[in-house]
Image (cartoon, coloured by chain):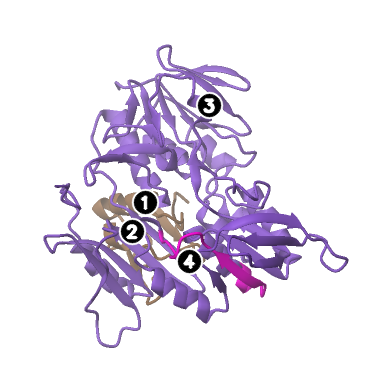
Amino acid sequence: MSILVQTDACVGAGQCALVAPDVFDQDDNGIVLLLEPDPEGADLAAATRAVRLCPARAIALSTA
Amino acid sequence: MSGPARVVIVGASIGGLTVAESLRDEGFEGEITLLGDEPHLPYTRPPLSKQILAGEWRPEQAAIRTAAELDELGIRVRTSRRATGLDVEARTLHTADGPISFDELVIATGTQPRPHPVLAEASTLRTMDDALRLRERMDAARRVAVIGSGILGSEIASAARKRDAEVLLVGRSGALGFGGVGTLLSEDLVRLHEAHGVELALRAELVAAQSAGAADAPDATALEFADGTTRTVDLVVTMIGGTPRTDWLASSTLELADGVVCDRLGVAAPGISAVGDVAAWHDPITGRHRRVEHQSNAIEQAIAVAGRLAHGGEGAPPVPLFWSEIHGARIHAYGWFDPERSLAELPTAAESAGIVYGSHDADGELRGIVGWNAPPREFRTARAAVVTTARPLIHHS
């Protein structure tokens, strides 16, 4: 599983950095920064929750 | 596994789709059918009044899932399918194309724009098709009037300014609103609009409108206000709020007030839940049933309902979280806001250009925050300090 981010869709709500702080951060404008593109274990579970919570659908999980 | 065999979801926007996806996240293996009355596969609505209207995005960029992805998740999507009635006892949904039986039904039909009493035919915005039509009309309009003092009115005014139109923003009340924050941010919003060349007409009631087409402006409309002033514009957009789409439930036994009345877990009746803008969940903070028209609320309600349907769990009640971008200003709000108590600026790092406002309750507890171009870390820090336990916001005597 790897994480894909679409920064032009990001609205900077910060849900991802809040629920998966080891996977996501935000730049000074609030836009998502990907810290860990291939999370495992608890980080993967947190990232999955972040994907679902993102109000802009700016992050996705890829099985590729 | 136990649980329902067949879940039917009415409404294929973010709330309905998130229920379907989250059911799969939770390991639900039964049948999932998602009905939408639009011809499109699910897409996100917030960009409609922002990137789509401003011409920055193509419609495909708002799409959430491809047909292949939905297929792979085992979510059967039926587009252009309208629900027409519901038999609660028989657990049968009626649609324009025939009845569908279910074990669990989730209602996620959202809202529709309230027509303006004077301008029932004016442009408004709910769907992708509305946004694309409106964008086309904006291309041809030099003078735009936006009627409505809420977030959407401000966003459309902002999008029209981005396209260099002359913009008049009209509100019947004396203040601009920002969702659950109410009018507490009005002064900041007024300053923001004025700094970006939007003309504001607040406490202005539109009493008449008539076609004023001329050779050089065939679509012109003359607006007349209660104080006798008039204004001619090329395009009028009305955004005076939404009404829950519950017409199709009128003959059912569900309790409808302003929306589908639900308990604090989103249950409307045995086997029937509701999520998103259409759903009036019982809110322990205010002690009332109330609807919340924000994307994040729909998502969190959908996740909670899916968890409950899949294995009976009770999710945490959503905390309001909403955002906007108006004339380039990023505004985020989280928590609850008492309209009677003004916002206080919270301390931020000295070099910070943004502002974090706090809303405190009668006991001095932080209950809501607003970030205005706030550095993300400061907003997240402030957010962690917001008291979200189920204690009342306002003490009723």
Q: Is residue B313 left or right of residue B85?
A: left
Instruction: Give the residue number, with chain letter if any, for mark 1.
Output: A53
Q: Position of residue A38 (x, y in %)?
A: 36, 59
> As shown in the figure, which amino acid type bears the numbered disc 4?
Thr
Q: In the figure, B80 relative to B216: above or below?
A: above
User: Is residue B211 on the magenta stretch?
Assistant: no
Disc 4/disc 2 C-alpha distance (Å): 14 Å
Instruction: Give the residue number, with chain letter if any, for mark 4.
Output: A7
The chain that hosts pointer 2 is A
The residue shown at (49%, 64%) is B203
- Name the residue nearer the viewer: B20 or B132: B132
Do dots 2 and 3 share one subunit?
Answer: no
Instruction: Give the residue number, with chain letter if any, for mark 2.
Output: A15
In which quadrant is the N terminus of chain B drawn? top left
Q: Nearer the viewer, mark 1 or mark 4?
A: 1
Name which of mark 4 and mark 2 comes first in the sequence: 4
Q: Quadrant of residue B27?
A: top left
Q: Is residue B377 left or right of residue B81?
A: left
Disc 4/disc 3 C-alpha distance (Å): 39 Å
Contact, mark 2 vs mark 1 (Cβ under 8 Å)? yes
Q: Nearer the viewer, mark 4 or mark 3?
A: 3
Disc 1/disc 4 C-alpha distance (Å): 16 Å
> As shown in the figure, which amino acid type bears the numbered disc 3?
Trp
- Tell me, what hue is chain B? purple
